[in-house]
Amino acid sequence: VSGPEISCLEVWPEIADFIDGILDPTLRWRIELHLDGCERCAAVLDGVRTVLALAADAQMFDLPTGFGVRLKRVLARKLDAD
Amino acid sequence: VGIQTPSGAADSAPRGIGGNDQHRFRDETIFPTPSSTARAPRRERPVEDELALIKRVCAGETRLFHDLISPYQRSIYVTAFAELQNAADAEEAAQETFLKAFAHPGRFRQEAKFSTWLIQIAVNVARSKRRKDRKSLYESTDAGTDEEGDHSPRDFADWRETPIEALQRTELQRALKNAIASLDAAHREVFVMRDIEKLSIAETAEVLRISAALVKTRLLRARLRLRDALAPAIDGAWSIGEEHWLKVRPW
């Protein structure tokens, strides 16, 4: 039976699933153990989490000014045409 | 030495942002926790209300269509923008998406969420538009994109010890937008579906017509590439798009 130790090379491919919380509990635990002692992987994980937090910000992708008005106009024209 | 037991199942609290661990490092005025992000919670419409609205539109009350699609304007625009990388083209594709949905509301089969159905249409419209614009000659979502193998972050620049406090949110957002734009379409669309539009892996796979395994592979790579792209260089400046990174320190 292999021990709980896991290498950085084994951690990186699992980072997305780790963040999404869909890892097998045992593998998750082994990665958590690794992260507690590995500055590099912890930094990578933090970096990815920061990317996700920024991406979740509504201000990231605002609609162009007037988008809603123009859409309403397009739909109204279609309605009138029908 | 005590034996630690797996804690993953019980403790799924994220580390770092929003997590409660020793690696927490951010100034939350710059890096909000997910719960404090400025993203206003979508005013979720109860599914029953939405289905009732769809029925009425299908029954001829077409003037209700705008109410029906109104909550999804941003999602559809962002989806189209992920494909087309141009605001005017994305708006045109978004309008076309809603017109297609308006023309055939009865095609919504309720096997998926209404929003997912709209996003599916938007992906098809935007891809078609991109093909017409011949952009696919230069970039294809189906092209071999080195799906397997190298998942290594390129750089270990540690954000915790760089002068991030001086960087403004808008600068970070601009940097991330540039980084997302620099992804190839295959990785960009998976990132946008999953991490911006918050579709599940299964929904993302369905919308993009790829396997769930491929979604996961592309998502991992996209997230790591974006993380790498945002890693600050030694002088604290952003170096988006540069070939080589000045590392904060050699590891």
Image: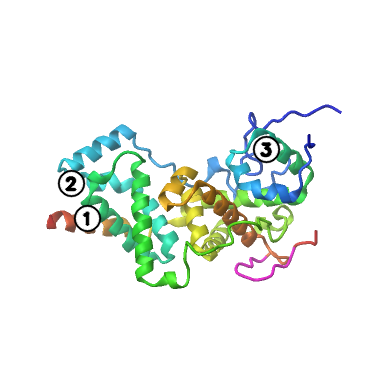
Give the numbered dot on residue B65.
Answer: none
Residue at x 39% of width, y 72% of height: B134
How busy is the neighbourhood of tag 2: few (under 14 within 10 Å), some, or many (20 plus)? many
Q: Chain of mark 2?
A: B
Whole-number angstrom distance, CA of label 1 to CA of label 2: 10 Å
Q: Secondary structure at mark 3?
A: helix
Front residue of this view, candidates B235 and B158: B158
Whole-number angstrom distance, CA of label 1 to CA of label 3: 49 Å
Give the numbered dot on residue B62.
Answer: 2
Quadrant (top left, top right, bottom left, bottom right) of the N terminus of chain B: top right
Do callouts 3 and 2 mark residues in contact (Cβ within 8 Å)? no
Residue at x 30% of width, y 32% of height: B48
Q: Secondary structure at mark 2?
A: helix
Q: Which residue is mark 3?
A: A28
Front residue of this view, candidates B47 and B221: B221
Label whose residue precedes the other's in the sequence (1 or 3): 3
Q: Secondary structure at mark 1?
A: helix
Residue A45: image x %, image y %?
67, 48
Q: Chain of mark 3?
A: A
Residue A57 shows in the view:
no
Residue at x 64% of width, y 28% of height: B10
Residue at x 61% of width, y 56% of height: B148
Tell me the quarter of the picture where residue B228 sits: bottom right
Relative height, residue B68 to residue B230 (above, below): above
- Which amino acid is tagged 3? Arg
Q: Any magenta on residue B68?
A: no
Q: Is B191 left or right of A82, judged from the image as shown? A: right
Q: Which residue is mark 1?
A: A75
Residue B93: image x %, image y %?
33, 61
Relative height, residue A2 to residue B122 (above, below): above
